[in-house]
Amino acid sequence: MSSRRSKVAPQYDVIVVGSGAGGGMAAYQLSVQGLKVLLLEAGRDYDPVTETPMFQTPKDAPLRGSGNADKPFGFYDATVDGGWRVPGEPFTTAPGSQFSWWRSRMLGGRTNHWGRISLRMGPYDFKPKSRDGLGEDWPMTYETMAPYYDKAELLIGVYGGDDDLENTPRSSPGVLQPPPAARSYELLTKQACEPLKIPVIPAHRAVLTKRQDSARLPAKLHPGNALAQRVLRQSMNERMACFYATDCGRGCSIKANFQSTTVLIPPAMATGNVTLITDAMVREVSLDAQGKASGVHYIDKLTRVDHHVTAKVIVLAASACETSRIMLNSRSTLFPNGIANSSGVVGKYLMDTVGAGLSAQIPRLEGLPPVNEDGTAGIHMYMPWWNYGEQKAGKMSFARGYHIEFGGGRGMPGPGIFGGLESFTQGAYGRKFKEEARRYYGSFMYFDGRGEMIPNEDSYCEIDPSAVDQWGIPVLRFHWKWSDHETRQAAHMQQTFAEIIGKMGGTVQGTVQTDGSKAIATGGSIIHEVGTVRMGSDAKKSVLNEFGQTWDVKNLYVTDGATFVSNADKNPTLSILALAWRSCDHIVEELKRGNL
Amino acid sequence: MSDELHDAQHDELREDTKPMSNPMPRRDALKAMAVAAMVPMLPESAAASPAPASREPLPLLNELQQQAKRKGPRGTPSDPVLQVAKADWPRKLLLRELATLGALCDMIIPADGKSLAASTVGAPGYINEWASRPGGDSSLVRVRGGLAWLDRESQARFGKRFHLATNAQRTAICDDICYQPKAKPEHQFAAQFFDTIRDQTATAFYTTPQGWKDLGYIGNVAIPTFEGPNAEIRRQIGLE
């Protein structure tokens, strides 16, 4: 790293804004190529090795670890200064729109707490419009992306099976980690789904079930790059395999699961090519007289001083909507509607995942002998979408699919554990209550659908001219609308869950909604918000080319979920990582060619 | 890396404090405004005169650097220290109320052949923590109102407070309020209260090591391999 003692601002090759999946990957890939990177993170520095509450129990936490407005996913959740609200950083929603926006302000962003579910998009997912006429196609194919999925999976470590189903592609041989054994309730669900012809297969999650092969993988991932191989080998050697305890949502001090702060940022820093500044809230990309991006303005949150830093290339990965916000706030004579927004598409085509859930009580799971079902603290099995053929044949009332995530069993007893027991036991108390608790413990399950939303004109974000945050930055206003494709899909989820629960001999808790608008989760609340700076093959209808490079400003790239053209039911993080890797390869090549 | 970074910030902050000359570039003007915004926090002398040209940092700026150096949680509600957590708000229930509450907790989860009673593992203390929490005013009203009702009801029926009544007498009251759908109209509030305390007592009890043992939760331990269910469980749930 160049000396910072000089009064002359250091010259960076690349400024990366954001340190989550997209930014962490960019910092890693660019720094191992020898580029000087300035990594800016709006939150505080965060070290999962020392900060993760491994093995802490609910009893050790206030209110037994239950969630509140400051820590909505519970006391131990690895979210700093965030959740559904960020102190001093509001957003607004347009009249008639409901939207939830989960943010965190910490190194590594939301990769610290996510569910680690890592599903590839398939061939149909890249060309949805070609298949059914709705939405838009991506500018590349699955075949183009498959090698990057392989590499991303090898880098972060993903467990899964070798099933090869329609639009649910398998990874190349040797890429995935072994899947963990199924739990009793997962096996029971698989059995119940057989007559329904719903496949139940090993889930793919970014958790190491064995240590990575640090002797072989670095050379495979970075052929001919001694620096990359050295830092990756060191990083892989620091990662342990899962020991099947402690919720992944707390983060992982033994680095068994993927989070940017354990897998991407340490090797990036080890190159010596990265300068990291935390508490740096980027507000604007600056433009030079030639119409190229010259740098970014950020506010140091501790001093409230405004800074300007410069580099040859700017990579935005602040999270989908935050990236849009920065671009829309970067106004100039050349780009009065925001930088690189000649198409007017920045902020548009915001998507989330369709979510609907149903809970059940399963008598066959009552009163079982003690067994440790913590596992990888996430799903071991799931159901990929199984009705592609029916949809293609026009036999369904909605166009796109969903997968099912499900859980239950004998997990760690936490707050609210027997909240529903009054109705199950007709008001038991005393010795009877204790007997009923023993009987019912482990017999509750939930089923969650995670479905594709088709981008629409009515779901977008824009700058709210009437509000700023505490840093003086104009905030986002969200507009949101589901189409019938999504609400009918949510109703179908409910019907499917009820059928599965029925086959298991279980009892549905609550109501099976036939009206999907009553079952569907609020937009944004599945925390898969993507789009708003989409890729495309037409500069009039998109902001980015297939490499995440803006059409208008060739040295400005986006590598987070903002780039998404569609939002397949596959959870987005793995795709963000694969896409970011490919974007970085393009940046390196273009810099070499002198094109940036 | 971090030292160099802080040196750089240090320099930049010192730049801000140099005497100003006009005309001022826009960026410097903004910085000056940012410094001006901090003035009320500065010692009076510093606020009254132009910032010193000294290369020594001002005390305030020094403190900011310290802050910038600090890693780890900042101890705010949205960034609490997770490793040594505690519920540090004042408890509001009186000893008198805790006596009644303890008796009710033990009616819900009494000792039996397998495990202790709820009060033995601290359930009343937990419910006090919960009902006293910031923003928990409606919970506190429900708990206090319910406890007051319980003592009055016991006094009216048996001439003594709830915790001094016999087990049979307490059972007579609990039977009336333990199930909301069957509670008489005049007992609706008491039944809601009872269900709240049942839920909270269960939360308190079953999140302790004793409660885990009672239920047969044997996780939260590091194990080298994860096995699926054994043959006995597979048979019981009907997989074999």
Image: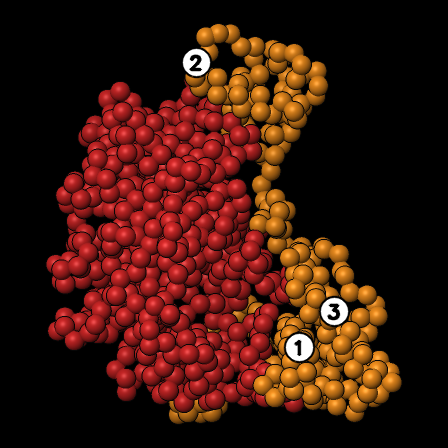
Chain colours: A red, B orange
What's the amino acid at mark 2? Pro
**In front here: A223 or B124?**
B124
N-terminal label among 1 and 2? 2
N-terminal label among 3 and 2? 2
The location of residue B236, given as percent across then percent down, is 47, 92
Q: Quick check: marks 1 and 2 in contact, CB under 8 Å?
A: no
Among the 4 quarters of the image, the one containing residue B13: top right
- What residue does disc 3 label? B144
Marks 1 and 2 sit apart, C-alpha to C-alpha, by 69 Å
What's the amino acid at mark 1? Phe
- What residue does disc 2 label? B25
Q: Is residue A322 left or right of residue A242?
A: left
The location of residue A385, given as percent across then percent down, is 26, 71
**In front here: B149 or A288?**
B149
Please, which residue is most extreme toward the right here? B159
Quadrant location, the N terminus of chain A: top left
Marks 3 and 2 sit apart, C-alpha to C-alpha, by 64 Å
The location of residue A279, given as percent across then percent down, is 50, 37
- Same chain check for tags 1 and 2: yes
Among the 4 quarters of the image, the one containing residue A435: bottom right
Please, which residue is most extreme toward the top here? B22
Residue at the image position 42 percent from the left and 52 percent from the top: A101
Tag of residue A552: none
- What residue does disc 1 label? B189
Q: Is residue A271 left or right of residue A581?
A: right
